[in-house]
Image (cartoon, helix red, strand yellow):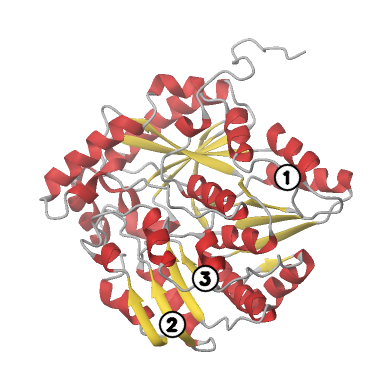
Amino acid sequence: MHTVREGLMADGAGLAGDRVVSAGSTARVLVAATARALRGADCADLGHTGPVSRFPGAPEPVRRAAVTRAAGRVALTPGQTAEVDAERVARWFVDQYGRGSYPGVVLGSPHGAAAHLAVALGMPWLPAGFEMTVHWAQGGVDRPGGALDHGAALTGRLLAGNDDLHVRQVHCPASRGALAGVTVSLTARWRALPAAYRRFLADRLTPGAPVLLLRDARTWPVLDSGPGHSFQVGCPGSGLDPVDFHPDSHALRQVLRSAGGDAARWEAPQVSSAAGYAEHGVESGFELSARDWAARAGRRLHRVLSPRPEALSAAVADLYRRWLRAAGKTGDRLVVECGRLLDPWQVVRAGLVPYWCENATRRSVEGVEWWLAGSEPFTSVDVLPEPPGVRSPALAGLPQWLAVAGFGGRRRALDRTAARGYPVTSVPTRRATEVLRAQPYDLPVPPPMAPAEAVEVLRDSGTHQGLLVS
């Protein structure tokens, strides 16, 4: 019989998972996209356009006001953090995969190529954590110290009912724009496999099915502010470096001016020189728990450590090319996806090679340019640049995206809808579906790749990219 510890919620109580997990967060989109692909469905029903899509030519103050109003409708209230049940969130993730058994599972850090890898293997993908946004009524985009204080109080409420979490708070006006001044961003990372995951692995995996654990190995200066709570100013996904968040930084002044802040008020908390894994890292306890489960169940666990997103994107693109050619397809048609603009089912339906850019930063786009320069040519290249909805000196311009499309031999396409109003508008995930549906069919879909073969391809292709596969 389930017992309730004092101060904790009863089993099944608390907010629903789709209310807790941030709308449009990478983990949420990837679970939805992978689950749909495994049942032969695309992402035509996935939205999350954001408010700025309705104001393509509006002045910045109007756009910021629209963002603030939209955040108020979807963010959690401070009181609701006490109602979060991380176990219920885990159940919500696994329940999206319906019934049936699988030849393995992919766990870990959120990454679009992880979703494509899972689909090629016929496996589900499950995250090692989830993102939340919570109201900050007296906030300011230029007040990271205030964000830390507010986040610490919220984390206390959250951990009172979820002692199996570590909460990483991120204050990053470069990637979140004005949102960083009205909400706080909390990434909750499980310190062990949640019970729902353990049941899923035990009940839904075929005998001998392996576990693939993907870890984002990027580091960032981190402040451990208290038990179960850590804080970072900026993030790797911003396309900036930690030094760029110093008050004397020209880049920071540009970012804050665009987001409605003032660099003169910027006083970031003192962070030790030692760097820890950034917000999308995997807790060591989560990996240990997965290893222990695999050992007890007689399963093989493979770990893939990625030093930067581009390394995994390149390795999985190479894997797809090999997989498609083994099935008698050309493997010469590429789609470059970005952020939430992806659709794994339409990719396999059309026989495309997918390369996923984490975001629209110059650093991310340079990664695909370098990979393309060193790859066998593609006859067609379709590019889906996701407008981030913010302005930043780290963003790639449309000419750089056009240069990526220019690698196509006969077809070179940059999605005009995504480019219209770039970078300050936003487009929904289903835009990727609309574009990819126009690609010619290339059926039948290849049979799932064997896990052992996939591990070998990742090891062979990824070594020179810096991937560590064990």
Place of residue 125 in the rendered image (x, y in percent of width and height, measured from the top left): 63, 51
Pick whichever, 199 or 314, lies toward us: 199
**Residue at 50%, 89% in the rendered image:** 377
- Looking at the rendered image, the quarter that the C terminus falls into is bottom right
**Residue at 65%, 64% in the rendered image:** 120
Residue that numbered label 3 is attached to:
350
The crowding category of the residue bearing disc 2, from other C-alpha atoms within 10 Å (few below 14, some 14 to 19, many at least 20), is some
- Residue at disc 2, secondary structure: strand
Above or below 377: residue 387: above
- Residue at disc 3, secondary structure: helix
Mark 3 or mark 2: whose residue is earlier in sequence:
3
Q: Amino acid at mark 2?
A: Ser
Q: Amino acid at mark 3?
A: Ala
Place of residue 104 in the rendered image (x, y in percent of width and height, measured from the top left): 75, 54
**Residue at 43%, 24% in the rendered image:** 153
**Marking on residue 100:** 1
Q: Is residue 373 visible?
A: yes
Q: Are marks 3 and 1 in contact (CB under 8 Å)?
A: no
**Residue at 23%, 50% in the rendered image:** 53
Q: Give the Cα separation between the discs numbered 3 and 2.
A: 13 Å
Q: Give the Cα separation between the discs numbered 1 and 2.
A: 36 Å
Q: Would residue 328 be found to the left or right of residue 166 on screen? A: right
Q: Give the Cα separation between the discs numbered 3 and 1.
A: 25 Å
Place of residue 427 in the rendered image (x, y in percent of width and height, measured from the top left): 31, 54
Place of residue 141 in the rendered image (x, y in percent of width and height, measured from the top left): 26, 42
Residue that numbered label 2 is attached to:
380
- Looking at the rendered image, the quarter that the N terminus falls into is top right
Above or below 322: residue 217: above
Pick whichever, 294 or 384, lies toward us: 384
Q: Amino acid at mark 1?
A: Gly
